Image: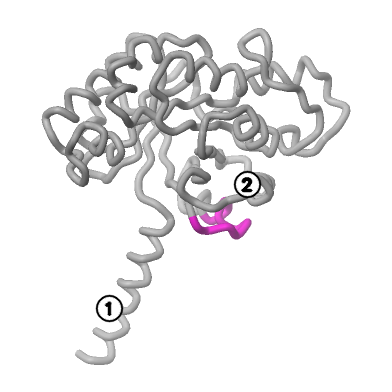
Amino acid sequence: MSLFDPNANNARYGVMVRIVRTVAVGPIAAAAGLEFIMLDMEHGDYSIETVATICAAAPPELTVLVRVPELSRGYVSRVLDSGARGVMVPMVETAEQAEKLVGWSKFTPVGERGLCTGAGHTRYRTGTPASQIMESENHNVLAIAQIETAAGIENIDTIAAVAGLDALLIGPNDLAVSLGSPGNPDTPKQDAAIERVAEAARRNGKIFGMHAPEKTLAKWASRGLRLVMHSLDLTILNDGFRDAGIAARRAVER
């Protein structure tokens, strides 16, 4: 089932997961009310095997997306065959890169993804007709271009126009670095850049997404933000451990 209803202007909420590799992460995220998690292969050290294991253990109500380290056929096709319901490529800067992402993540007639008839994407069932697999995957898999450089902003109109590309997702931190304000993503220059992405998404019927703190997400909610990602498993663990330590000390030392 697709994360997004094409006939509804709905938002979906999730968290980036970079260090946790237990198969329980999917059921825990679903029990907490999240609708998706995104496994981070760009900055994390996940293997394809770990991705496949987490995807296999995820409950039906949770969508597993994957940010791959780079734009390559091997990464894109293998994480999808492993059962991920979407793939995000970091630092997409040109329409040609977006076209490759679509080509490797969608089957014909949309793209040229290689056909595997029995793996994580079929829940390891065999015997399903190829045409059924291809139609289902093309409908349910998200091809996501992460826009986080000045070049990506400059070319956003042609990127957003690529047929088969589903979503444009802002990476505020790297975008701030590329725009000359590292560590400070809240500048007029960055706001203008993000506005261009939001408008390009709206004009081309793409999903507008962002991975950002709550304040930033709230700032852009009115511009059609739909793929909404907040925080990181590492941050959640750090905050939780710190709060637990503070509470324990407070209980004993008061």
Above or below residue 112? Residue 76 is below
What numbered label is drawn on residue 51? Answer: 2
| Residue 75 vs residue 24, the one in the foreground | 75
Instruction: Name the residue type under label 2.
Output: Val
Say whether disc 1 or disc 2 marks the residue closer to the N-terminus.
2
Instruction: Name the residue type under label 1.
Output: Ile
Most extreme residue toward the left is 188
Residue at (46, 48) in percent of width and height: 43
Packing grade of label 2 (10 A; few <14, some 14-19, many >=20) is many
Left or right: where 161 falls relative to 220 = right
Q: Position of residue 253 (x, y in %)?
A: 23, 91
Looking at the rendered image, the disc whose residue lies closer to the viewer, 1 or 2, is 2
Above or below residue 251? Residue 137 is above
The prevailing secondary structure element of the residues shown in magenta is loop
Judging by the rendered image, the residue that carries numbered circle 1 is 246
What numbered label is drawn on residue 220? Answer: none
Q: Position of residue 145 (x, y in %)?
A: 44, 26
Packing grade of label 1 (10 A; few <14, some 14-19, many >=20) is few
Magenta stretch holds residue 234: no
Q: Position of residue 196 (x, y in %)?
A: 25, 18
- Position of the C terminus, as image quadrant, is bottom left
